[in-house]
Image: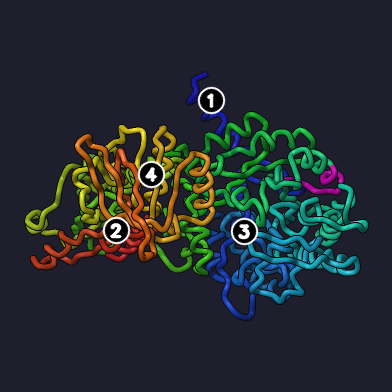
Amino acid sequence: MTEHAAREMNTELLFQPLTIASLKLPNRVLMTTVKLGYGTYGTPQGEVTERHIAFYVRRAEGDVGLITTEPLYIHPNGRELPTQLGIHDDHLLDGLRRLTDAVHAAGGLIMAHINHAGRVANPKLMPEGERVSASAVLCPANQVLPRALTREEIPTYVHYFAQAARRVREAGFDAIEVPFSHGYLIHQFLSPHTNRRDDEYGGSFENRLRFGREVIAAVREAVGDDFPIVVRMNAQDYVEGGLTIEDAEVLVPLLEVMGVDALSITSGTMCESVPYCLYPTGTPKAHLLPMSARIRQRVSIPVAVAGRIRTPDVAGEALALGQADWIGLGRPFLADPDWVRKTEAGDEVAILRCAACHQGCLAELRKGHGTSCMFNPLTGREAEVQITPVELPRQVMVVGGGPGGMEAAIIAARRGHHVTLYEKDNRLGGRFREAVQVPYKEEFADLIRYQQVQLQRTGAEVHLNTRVTPEMVEAEDPDAVVVATGARPIVPPFPGLEETRWMTAYDLLDGRAEVSTATAFIVGAGTAGMETAEYLARRGVRCTVVKRRPEVGKNLDPLARALLLRRLEGLGVDVRTGVEVVRFETDAQRQTTVIARPWPHQKGAPELHFPAETVIIALGLRSDPSLVEALEAQGGPGIHVVGDCLEPREALDAVWEGFEVGRTL
């Protein structure tokens, strides 16, 4: 059997039905819980909105086997977000029924994930006395020091879970998921790291499991014997003194005896090991599969596993190897709600794959905008935005083949416009090509690949190695011009720079320059400077990175930045802040010295001297408005500017702006 045939056979396993208790699933793909933040601020809180309904219906239309809701809080003091869905009160039932009815009408199945965050709860949403946990153990992520639940309070919290479970069934959900994971309340009782109690709920494993056991019994009584109960649990906490895979192997047969119908395997805690909950760029891909396989050997109930399983190949192979019975995907369904449908059709090349960047999902969630996707501007806007065909097709000229220009061309062509895209280089991708070269960002290439596929399928005409001039635009006489020509690196006029061996970080990462020396001195510790340092350090180049201001990599996702800094430290990269480069001095032997001074300036402070074999400038980008200005002066068609050409920002801004121009032309 060829490797291709084996992959196809493995992928077919994803489309075998699966039975969870009384629930028959059409395939082996589970959408795991993803925080959305689509609720409304103020009161009433926790209610379903049209935005929620449209989001989940779109995933049902994509043939996801079972959709899991975002965490539904069972009591207000267990909330993580002010805009989180709730299931703590009967007044929420009407909205929840509208949600389940809509998903069912679209042919989908939906499972409610109920939760109390315990010490992970948002301290801004409750007074100090209501922040509760198994024990008074500080949560480093939010600096909450909870109070321990009293023995008398514990049955009340078990009751909260039971009442939430009753509402789950009454609202028409198809299953219920209870988290013994991620450092939430049940996990806080289960883990010795957070459970320091000396009563019957603390100490031994059996005692620490008591709260979870009581919750499962109460949930079962509330939903009945025929209703599927799934437990989401950690294979590994990645916390000193926390739960390990060996603990998981002890736990799972006990859960099966309790009457749990299926398991969903995950990892990490939201207080101490957040990267292993949220898996940003730089975390390992699909690394829970061997642990899931060990867990599966201990039970007879179905076992799902998640954790950066991006592609049908990996998912199908996990099933073929017996590492899991079904596959959990979360953020991949933010990027492409049709992941399942495209896989089943054998059209995997058209899947828009998640790159774990966090720019559109968690970053937007933190801003209070609700979860979206850097690659898919429709995510979270399904209720308000549609791509509609045009009545009168127009001639559209797109200048620049980066993510913003390609997105504009794709959407405009999809709507029926006649689109021609011009790129001055010999390949598409723009500055996104540089990101692909950065360690752990190779998955960003998937956006370029996806956009190239879509350009071809929509019929947009693409011309490479073509620099557009105002005369060319005048000759073609299009109805609209989209300018996405990007930005240029900022290179200050440092005295002596031209006599040194130097390059920009952007030329280096795009392959237009290379470092042939043993050391490199990088000016700038933003995203480009820090990522360039890792790129070089992994190739054996010793790097010094300097920056005037105290923050480094400030535009990076906080989790990705923390991981990057840890890696740079391990690679021996010397990162210094409070250093302002003044000039470069190169002697007759071509030996360069960087002359700098402390910042803020200190009167009488001595200059700082750094040897520099190769200097790399990574001080950001400046927009290039030259073509726009020339076209405006010339007059003619409507001009639309997107991406870095308008203002250097993140790739998310370029993609979204290109999308908006494409859908409104």
Q: First in sequence: mark 3 or mark 1?
A: 1
The circle drawn on residue 119 is none
Q: Is residue 75 above or below residue 396?
A: below
Name the amino acid, label 3.
Answer: His
Residue 361: x, y in percent?
A: 50, 58
The circle drawn on residue 104 is 3
Q: Which residue is mark 1?
A: 6
Q: Residue furthest bottom?
A: 43
Q: Is residue 525 above or below residue 6?
A: below
The circle drawn on residue 644 is 2
Label 1 element class: helix
Task: Give the foreground label among 3 and 2.
Answer: 2
Q: Residue furthest right?
A: 200
For label 2, the crowd category at 10 Å Cα-Cα, with few meaning under 14, some 14 to 19 and many 20 or more, is many
Distance, label 3 to label 1, CA atoms, is 34 Å
> Please, which colouring scheme is shown?
rainbow
Magenta-colored stretch includes residue 358: no
Q: First in sequence: mark 1 or mark 4?
A: 1
Distance, label 1 to label 4, CA atoms, is 38 Å
Q: Which residue is mark 4?
A: 532
